[in-house]
Image (cartoon, rainbow, N blue to C red):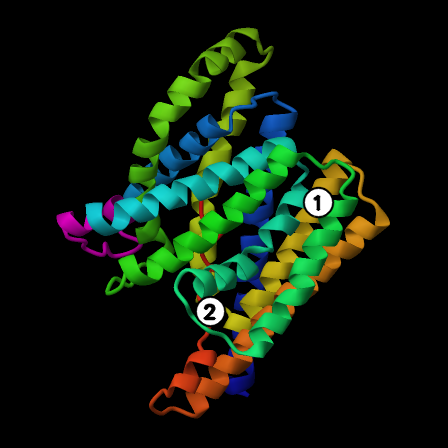
Amino acid sequence: MEDGKMGNATTIRAVLAILQWWGFNVTVIIMNKWIFQKLEFQFPLTVSCVHFICSSIGAYIAIKVLKTKPLIEVASEDRWKRIFPMSFVFCINIVLGNVSLRYIPVSFMQTIKSFTPATTVILQWLVWRKHFEWRIWASLVPIVGGIMLTSITELSFNMFGFCAAMVGCLATSTKTILAESLLHGYKFDSINTVYYMAPFATMILSVPAIVLEGSGVVSWLYTYDSVAPALVIIITSGVLAFCLNFSIFYVIHSTTAVTFNVAGNLKVAVAVLVSWMIFRNPISAMNAVGCAITLVGCTFYGYVRHLISQQATAAPGPRTPRGRMEMLPLTGEMQSDKI
């Protein structure tokens, strides 16, 4: 009886973790799109900078003041040699996501973002010469096919926004791969990651934001009718972006890897549905089919990774040259939503 109650409590905890993760993630995405489209604040660098500043302050309060997480000490030398390069790629990733949101609908952007597993595998194969078995490559076919179908049939297609989203996938994959080598030896959680990377990202982005968008922001402040409420929305989006990091930490520790993978793909579907209900961007039938194929492909990819991981655990032993074909690709699904 007690085991049953514990099982029910675990299930309820997992469901609540997933729901609050969905809530924060979808809200941040919708608010960013609202800022660009409805508030006419078309300055993605500035929005990203606001998010980094809020996250820097939030992480400091969480670790230093509230002590909700212990600080992972990093040597000063490693901060510049390891954390800074990661922060640079991290910054590019977030900025490109916001740039793409300015030019393309949330539904299209979220579908393209699902291409990240494919770019991660391809980069590791081309640059790092890692080899993967045929099941990994087969699982990428529906992802690539779905992305192609969605792109061809997208009614609100914008080449600049599309390219920004695609390069953002490459940046996410690069960040994931660099994390494996640069952060080796440090077991960062999501809050400590933000604590160290967000200040660097703010420093990196602040000058380009001022130079490229400063005059436009000043002009917007003078010409927009309801500046105060708009600024509240912009700052709130930054605060919620930091809260998203807590939600990711909570959901990772409350669910299994398979559940996280399935929930992550359903989260994309939720974001697409909610964004369509709010912004009413046109979606053709074939475009919806392409999005669905992509999400099914991502779920299949996660399932294949799980099977290979279980097989590797069940049959430990020295790796032979043939064993290189069974290497698992790195994956950044658990970290790709940060800030």
User: Residue 299's spot in the image, x, y percent?
Assistant: 63, 67
Question: Residue drawn at (42%, 80%), measured in percent from left and top?
Answer: 324
**Over which residues does the magenta segment extend?**
63-79
* Amino acid type, label 2: Pro
Along the viewing direction, whichever of 237 and 127 lies nearer the viewer: 127
- Is residue 64 located in the magenta-colored stretch of the structure? yes
Disc 2 and disc 1 in contact, CB within 8 angstroms: no
The quarter in which the C terminus is drawn is: top left
Sequence-wise, the earlier of marks 2 and 1 is 1
Checking the image for residue 329, the label placed there is: 2
Direction from residue 7 to residue 70 in the image, left or right = left
**Is residue 9 visible to the viewer in this orientation of the structure?**
no
Mark 1 lies on a secondary structure that is helix
Q: CA distance from mark 2 to mark 1?
A: 32 Å
Quarter of image, res 224: top right
Along the viewing direction, whichever of 246 and 331 lies nearer the viewer: 331
Mark 1 sits on what residue? 274
Checking the image for residue 52, the label placed there is: none
Q: Nearer the viewer, mark 2 or mark 1?
A: 2
* Amino acid type, label 1: Val
Direction from residue 40 to residue 199 in the image, left or right = left
Question: Residue drawn at (35%, 56%), measured in percent from left and top?
Answer: 178
